[in-house]
Image (spheres, rainbow, N blue to C red):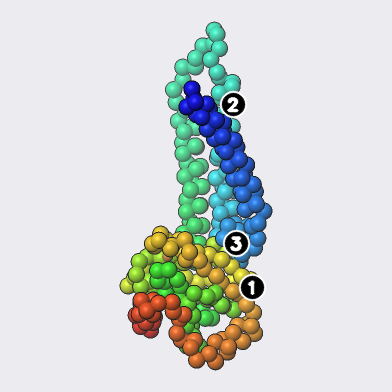
């Protein structure tokens, strides 16, 4: 009997707990939705920050505009048929089995639309993959679990700190990895590029001023979720000042170190960076 009471009490507590958990989750979701601001990872669709991201967004809406009428038409016809032709006492079923004209139309029209979507998307993929003439080149090296940026023109190397680039300039990233595959993902720029050991991949963007966030998008190990990306896009003057301040620092070439293993791997990486 006591066991039963304990069980009932436990169940009652659980129901209460469930309710509380639901409430807390709902509040957290609401808060998360409210706290989205420019520069957040989730905002690529409504607030693109680079010309490329704008193109990606336009292509998305262009595709939506072409395909949504088919969704509404098909679902509308389905609902119409369900109610109009539903089984009723005494109703005779229709006996026709095909309509070639209609079938040709509903095959050809979507096919043409698919070709249009494919052409516009392939064209966009081409623009994503091949950068226009770049104003500044940055060598990007990924390593578990941080990013290293090398500015060959200025002889500056930084790691575990925000990437600083000038606004409205074509920035080309030449990226590689020293261990496993990582992916440099910055939604606001429309950039998501895999960094592969032994290979150099290229990405580019032309962004407006602001602070942006991204993160590694390829599961790369236990601290993958902490492989965050920060990018500061500043005006030309601020950028030059930043370059000067960096060049003055004697230790600028050396990335921060936490332990000897890190230092060693970073030294290897340094050589790798030089080979880019
Ligand atoms: Cu990673």
Locate residue 63 relative to residue 174 in the image: left or right.
right
Residue appearing at x 54%, y 74% in the figure: 162
3D distance between C-alphas at marks 1 and 3: 14 Å
Does label 3 or label 2 sit earlier along the sequence? 3
Q: Secondary structure at mark 3?
A: loop
Percent position of residue 201, x then y: 40, 71
Locate residue 161 relative to residue 195 in the image: left or right.
right
Q: Secondary structure at mark 2?
A: helix
Between residues 80 and 39, which one lies in front from this camera angle? Answer: 39
Q: Would you say the beta carbon of the disc 3 residue lies within 8 angstroms of ligand 1?
A: no
- Would you name the residue on which mark 3 appears? 40
Between residues 96 and 274, which one lies in front from this camera angle? Answer: 274
Contact between labelled residues 1 and 2, with CB atoms less than 8 Å apart? no
Q: Residue furthest left?
A: 198
Residue appearing at x 53%, y 64% in the figure: 214
Badge 1 density bin: few <14, some 14–19, many ≥20, Cα 10 Å: some
- Would you name the residue on which mark 1 appears? 209
Compared to residue 165, the image places residue 105 above or below, namely above
Q: Which mark is residue 84?
A: none
Percent position of residue 140, x then y: 44, 75
3D distance between C-alphas at marks 3 and 2: 43 Å
């Amino acid at each position: 009997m006591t066991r039963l009471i304990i069980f009932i009490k436990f169940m009652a507590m659980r129901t209460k707990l469930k309710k509380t958990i639901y409430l807390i989750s709902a509040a957290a979701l609401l808060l998360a939705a409210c706290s989205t601001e420019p520069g957040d990872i989730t905002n690529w669709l409504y607030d693109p920050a680079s010309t490329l991201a704008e193109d990606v967004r336009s292509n998305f809406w262009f595709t939506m505009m072409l395909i949504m009428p088919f969704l509404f038409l098909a679902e509308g016809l389905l609902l119409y048929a369900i109610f109009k032709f539903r089984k009723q006492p005494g109703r005779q079923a229709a006996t026709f089995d095909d309509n070639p004209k209609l079938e040709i139309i509903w095959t050809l029209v979507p096919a043409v639309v698919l070709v249009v979507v494919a052409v516009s998307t392939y064209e966009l993929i081409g623009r994503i993959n091949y950068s226009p003439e770049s104003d500044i080149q940055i060598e990007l090296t990924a390593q578990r679990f941080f990013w290293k940026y090398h500015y060959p023109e200025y002889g500056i190397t930084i790691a575990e700190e925000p990437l600083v680039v000038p606004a409205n300039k074509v920035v080309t990233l030449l990226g590689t990895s020293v261990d496993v595959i990582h992916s440099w993902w910055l939604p606001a720029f429309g950039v998501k590029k895999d960094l592969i050991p032994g290979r150099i991949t290229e990405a580019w963007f032309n962004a407006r001023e602001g602070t942006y966030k991204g993160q590694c998008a390829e599961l790369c190990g236990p601290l993958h979720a902490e492989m965050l990306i920060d990018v500061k896009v500043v005006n030309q003057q601020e950028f030059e000042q930043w370059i000067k301040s960096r060049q003055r620092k004697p230790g600028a070439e050396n990335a921060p170190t936490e332990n000897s293993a890190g230092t060693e791997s970073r030294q290897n990486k340094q050589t790798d960076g030089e080979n880019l």
